[in-house]
């Protein structure tokens, strides 16, 4: 309601409303709409944050070890002994990356991760490279995690192998619906499966270690047939080890998600996000090392028909009993729900890019549940396309995976190293710089700069190893996609910049008084009450009104001419012949003639009568002339298309 007391001294009127959206079918799927004021209450704590943002990293332990074995299989089973040493190196790399992102979380509490760090310290192009790499990685995260989860189902029920693509698409649809319900609700929905997976993996690894220490573990019974991709080689080579290492680094994907989504955490946001990151790192490290160690001990075999986790569980639990089924169920669910990390990160990152003018503005729109609905839907669509193209094969998707995230790791740590160098140039007693991300002197800046610089070198080396070893397997696709995406970002930004400059009121001044002519054209197909309503409206706009009838049937034209003498009110009626019974083309031809001969400062308005039936289903029974003319003429300057609705009871 309008409150006059609040608006006595201002031309602005603040109006409140009690309106609430009526319940419809979408509310049953994604929940009732939330008011903007509810946004602070939709934040999450550390426990739920671990489920939302760490599920991708934690779930990667279910397939990272297997991907190492797939590569090592080229040298035979004798090479499988290297899986544990390779895993140790990967965990060391994880520690380096986590230390860097812990610093990023506290330095940039508004989120954004590698994109914001690179933009603030390295410039626009490195930031766009990081953003493109992360967006590609998020799409692949959904495809790989869903495909891997379905692979667990296929391991337990091989007869479903031919249905893995439709099952994967159905899983993406389910996760999309859950994420559209909001961060808080999706986090609550994913919390139990995430912790159930951690519990079952701890039970499996603990049982395996105890049985191994007692000499009761044994090896995989009835193992699947050995599978490997590429040409078999004699002996273990350095290239093979690097290739296997690059495949195993998939375990690190998702580490950056927490830094991108800091704003989803409750206050103090940075502290809660940082603690969640450390929790995730310790759990990830233990699970990955435990699985790799036991996989080597039981002589597991990499296979598309039965996963390493399945072989590990049935060996540790001596068969396919209840604990085996619980482990497979937990692994399947966490792998499918791991896609939620991407659904939490992709929309936020794309919204930041859209706010900066590098992606469509629609991506900044928050839906009824205060989530970036367009970003969520876009991610689901692109991931589904990838799953169809690669037939939900984890091994075929992995070569595309991780190169983008390591590129973003490298740029983020390089940016942080430069940030600490800038901090070191400040005086200890100098006030913080005035900027979006203020700088102030900090003790220990040199050691932080060295640690970030060392981390950047390590992740850059891993990225190069990944690009070289996986190039022929499909990594070249990502290396091409990143420059293409940067080109798209630049194109969109130029459009928005040019549009903003064209529409800006800076130096615009007071617009001159309008003293031009106004010509109105009214297309008519018949003469009736709806036509007369449009003609009356046209006379309100201008005295220069011309009615235009496209003559396709002479008999119909004669009827209109007879009626015009009675109802035309001395207005002009132009009849345009159409010997080939075309309507739109002759009408547009006439309008184009008027446009080409119009005078300076003359505006031409096309007034189109439009019937509004009592029921929407009847719309298909009427020509949508206004819509057709609008599509054809909206790009012409000085031309306005207006439709005059005539409601038919």
Image: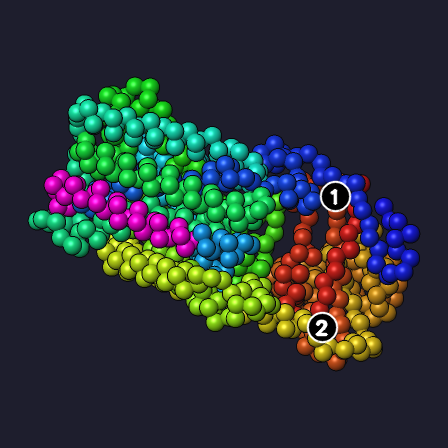
Q: Nearer the viewer, residue 7 or 536?
A: 7
Q: Position of residue 621 (x, y in %)?
A: 67, 45
Report x, y in % for residue 302: 22, 38
Of residue 499 and residue 448, the one placed in the foreground of this image is 448
Crowd class of label 2 (few under 14; some 14 to 19; many from 20; radius 10 Å): few
Task: Look at the numbered disc 1 and give the secondary structure of its residue.
Answer: loop
296 lies above or below 574: above
Element class at badge 2: loop
Percent x, y of residue 547: 78, 64
Q: Name the outermost residue toward the left.
A: 234
Outermost top residue: 321
Q: Residue at x 56, y 40 (%)?
A: 44
Marks 2 and 1, how far apart at CA: 42 Å
Mark nearest the camera among 2 and 1 is 2
| Span of residues in magenta | 73-101
Label total for image: 2
Q: How is the image coloured?
A: rainbow
Quarter in which the C terminus is drawn: top right
Circle number at residue 274: none
Question: Which residue ends up furthest to the bottom in the rendered image?
Answer: 600
Query: What is the quadrant of residue 202 in the picture?
Result: top left
Which residue is the site of mark 2? 505
Q: Which mark is residue 613?
A: 1
- Left or right placement of residue 388 versus residue 271 in this view: left
What residue is shown at x 12% (from left), y 49% (from top)?
A: 236
Image coords of residue 493 (percent x, y): 54, 67
Point 59% across, 72% down: residue = 498
């Amino acid at each position: 309601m309008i409150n006059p007391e609040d608006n006595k001294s201002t031309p602005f009127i603040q109006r409140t409303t009690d309106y609430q959206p009526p319940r419809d079918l979408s509310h049953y799927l994604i929940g009732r709409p939330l008011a903007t004021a509810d946004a602070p209450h939709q934040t999450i704590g550390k426990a739920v944050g671990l489920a939302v943002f760490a599920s991708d990293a934690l779930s990667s332990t279910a397939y990272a070890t297997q991907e190492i074995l797939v590569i090592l299989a080229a040298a035979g089973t004798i090479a499988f002994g290297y899986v544990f040493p390779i895993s140790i190196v990967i965990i060391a790399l994880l520690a380096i990356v986590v230390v860097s992102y812990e610093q990023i979380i506290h330095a940039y509490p508004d989120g954004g991760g590698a994109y914001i760090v690179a933009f603030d310290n390295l410039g626009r192009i490195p930031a766009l490279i990081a953003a493109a790499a992360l967006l590609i990685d998020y799409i692949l995260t959904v495809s790989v995690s869903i495909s891997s989860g379905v692979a667990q189902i296929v391991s337990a029920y091989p007869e479903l192998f031919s249905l893995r693509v439709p099952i994967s698409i159905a899983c993406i649809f389910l996760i999309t619906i859950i994420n559209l319900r909001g961060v808080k609700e999706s986090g609550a929905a994913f919390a139990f499966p995430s912790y159930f997976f951690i519990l079952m993996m701890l039970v499996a690894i603990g049982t395996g270690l105890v049985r191994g220490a007692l000499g009761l573990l044994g090896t995989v019974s009835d193992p699947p047939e050995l599978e490997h991709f590429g040409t078999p080689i004699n002996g273990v080579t350095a290239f093979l080890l690097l290739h296997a290492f690059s495949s195993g680094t998939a375990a690190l994907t998702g580490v950056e998600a927490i830094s991108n989504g800091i704003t989803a955490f409750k206050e103090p946001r940075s502290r809660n996000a940082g603690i969640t990151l450390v929790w995730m790192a310790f759990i990830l490290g233990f699970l990955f090392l435990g699985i790799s160690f036991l996989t080597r001990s039981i002589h597991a075999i990499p296979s598309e028909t039965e996963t390493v986790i399945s072989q590990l569980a049935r060996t540790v639990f001596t068969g396919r009993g209840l604990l085996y089924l619980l482990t497979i169920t937990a692994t399947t669910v966490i792998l499918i729900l791991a896609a939620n990390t991407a659904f939490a990160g992709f929309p936020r990152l794309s919204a930041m890019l859209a706010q900066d003018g590098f992606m469509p503005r629609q991506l900044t729109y928050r839906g009824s549940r205060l989530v970036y609905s367009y970003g969520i839907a876009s991610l689901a669509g692109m991931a589904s396309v990838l799953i169809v193209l690669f037939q939900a094969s984890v091994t075929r998707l992995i070569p595309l995976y991780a190169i983008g995230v390591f590129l973003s790791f490298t740029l983020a740590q390089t940016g942080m190293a430069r940030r600490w160098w800038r901090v070191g140039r400040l005086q200890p007693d100098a006030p913080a710089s005035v900027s979006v991300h203020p700088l102030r002197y900090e003790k220990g800046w040199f050691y932080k700069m060295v640690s970030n610089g060392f981390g950047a070198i390590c992740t850059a080396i891993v990225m190069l190893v990944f690009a070289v070893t996986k190039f022929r397997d499909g990594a070249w696709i990502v290396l091409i996609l990143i420059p293409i995406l940067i080109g798209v970002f630049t194109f969109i930004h130029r459009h928005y910049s040019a549009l903003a400059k064209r529409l800006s009121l800076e130096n615009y001044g007071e617009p001159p008084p309008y003293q031009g002519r106004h010509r109105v054209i009214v297309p008519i197909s018949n003469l009736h009450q709806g036509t007369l309503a449009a003609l009356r409206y046209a006379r309100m706009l201008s005295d220069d009104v011309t009615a235009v009838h496209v003559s396709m049937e002479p008999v119909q034209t004669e009827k209109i001419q007879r009626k015009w003498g009675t109802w035309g009110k001395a207005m002009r009626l132009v009849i345009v012949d159409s010997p080939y019974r075309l309507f739109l083309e002759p009408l547009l031809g006439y309008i184009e003639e008027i446009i080409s001969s119009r005078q300076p400062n003359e505006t031409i308005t096309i007034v189109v009568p439009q019937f509004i039936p009592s029921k929407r289903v009847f719309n298909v029974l009427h020509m949508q002339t206004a819509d057709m003319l609008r599509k054809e003429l909206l790009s012409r300057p000085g031309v306005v298309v207006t439709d005059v609705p005539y409601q038919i009871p």
